[in-house]
Image (cartoon, rainbow, N blue to C red):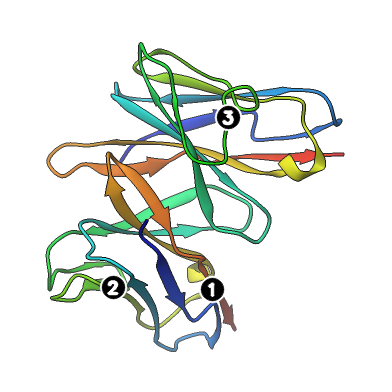
Amino acid sequence: SAVISQKPSRDICQRGTSLTIQCQVDSQVTMMFWYRQQPGQSLTLIATANQGSEATYESGFVIDKFPISRPNLTFSTLTVSNMSPEDSSIYLCSAEYGTGRLTQYFGPGTRLLVL
Amino acid sequence: SQELEQSPQSLIVQEGKNLTINCTSSKTLYGLYWYKQKYGEGLIFLMMLQKGGEEKSHEKITAKLDEKKQQSSLHITASQPSHAGIYLCGADEGAQKLVFGQGTRLTINP
């Protein structure tokens, strides 16, 4: 099965600061995805990251708040900017790949607490 | 956009008992994923279903997609403490984007 890793696994940050989360996939993939899971909630897609182009953001999410980089086919970063306590969530990256039927795999998540 | 409703929202069962979790879609499902999430952690892929009537099993977990492709069920046989967690169904909205149900929190009592 796929291996997707994320750094950091968790962090506690002060409001007004920014945090960059890294996601590494063990295979080359066309698209990577960033999701947010707020406390007690399900997952919500933030944006889709394609290599070599601007990320595509879902309704309610903007590039200034969540800038994304996708420098190559195995790596992406998500920055949570100017954080507030409402940004406290688990942030997960995912990618779809595999042999035969493609499957979407998720990283272990980054647990963020903003004070 | 597509909406997924899971039932029940939470479930407490005695170890060794069977259980079923349901996932109902507002639209036809073209790809339905089941994931398990340990509290505060990432998602572990369980199974993906695409064809109407499709059924897959892995160890003691069986997932089915109905013929109309609007409902899926996840059945656990002879539950164990290791089955505890949050079970999420996710639907492929196209372009590999997934929309998720609200999750079912499963507790197994010894």
The residue mark sitting in front, 2 or 3, is 3
Q: Tell me which residue sits at (36%, 25%) in the image.
A: A26
Q: Position of residue A85 (x, y in %)?
A: 81, 42
Picture quarter containing residue A100?
top left
Which type of secondary structure does the marked residue at label 3 adopt? Answer: loop
What's the distance in space between the residues labelled 3 and 1, CA to CA? 41 Å
- Counting other residues with Cα less than 10 Å from the Cα at mark 1, is it few (<14), some (14-19), or many (20 or more)? some
In the image, residue A82 above or below residue A97? above
- Tally of numbered tags: 3
**Mark 3 packing: few (<14 Cα in 10 Å), some, or many (20+)?**
few
Residue where numbered disc 1 is placed: B81
Q: In the image, are marks 3 and 1 on the same chain? A: no
**Which-is-in-front pick, marks 2 and 1?**
2
Q: Residue at x 49, y 31 (%)?
A: A5
Please determine if labels 2 and 3 lie on a single subunit.
no
Which numbered dot is residue B72?
A: 2
Q: Which chain is mark 2 on? A: B
Residue underneath mark 3: A62
